[in-house]
Image: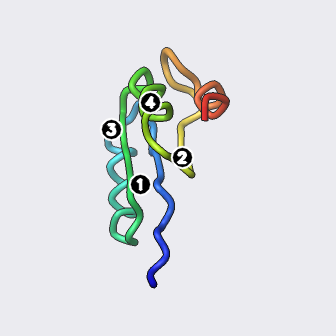
Amino acid sequence: MVARRPRVLVVDDDAAMVSTIADGLEDRGYDVARTSRPEEAEALVRDLSVEVVITDLRMPALDGIALLELS
């Protein structure tokens, strides 16, 4: 039996950074949700079963610490 890898949420207001991190994780077999819109991240945390969050700490509208407090 193959263990399921954790679902990871990648959030950064820099879309290129999100792609770089998320693509690398997907290449390693992780299930990745991604967004470069911090306001969308709140809904993803609520609606998805996310075990790991990788986030920028300083973003407009929502900082990374506030996002982690939601998860």
Q: Secondary structure at mark 4?
A: helix
The residue carrying mark 2 is: 54
Q: Earlier in the sequence, mark 4 or mark 3?
A: 3
In contact (CB < 8 Å): disc 4 and disc 3? no
Identified at 37% across, 27% down, the residue is: 37
Q: Secondary structure at mark 1?
A: helix
Mark 4 Cα within 10 Å, few/some/many (few <14, many 20+)? many
Compute the Cα span from label 3 to label 2: 14 Å
- Describe residue 2's horizontal placement relative to residue 69 as left or right: left
Compute the Cα span from label 1 to label 4: 16 Å
In contact (CB < 8 Å): disc 1 and disc 2? yes
The residue carrying mark 3 is: 15
Q: Earlier in the sequence, mark 1 or mark 4?
A: 1
Tag 3: amino acid: Ala
Q: Earlier in the sequence, mark 3 or mark 1?
A: 3
Q: Quadrant of the C terminus?
A: top right
The residue carrying mark 4 is: 41
> Is residue 22 or residue 43 the one in the foreground?
43
Nearer mark to the viewer, of 4 and 3: 4
Residue 7 higher or lower than 3, as above or below: above
Q: Name the disc covering residue 21, or none.
A: 1
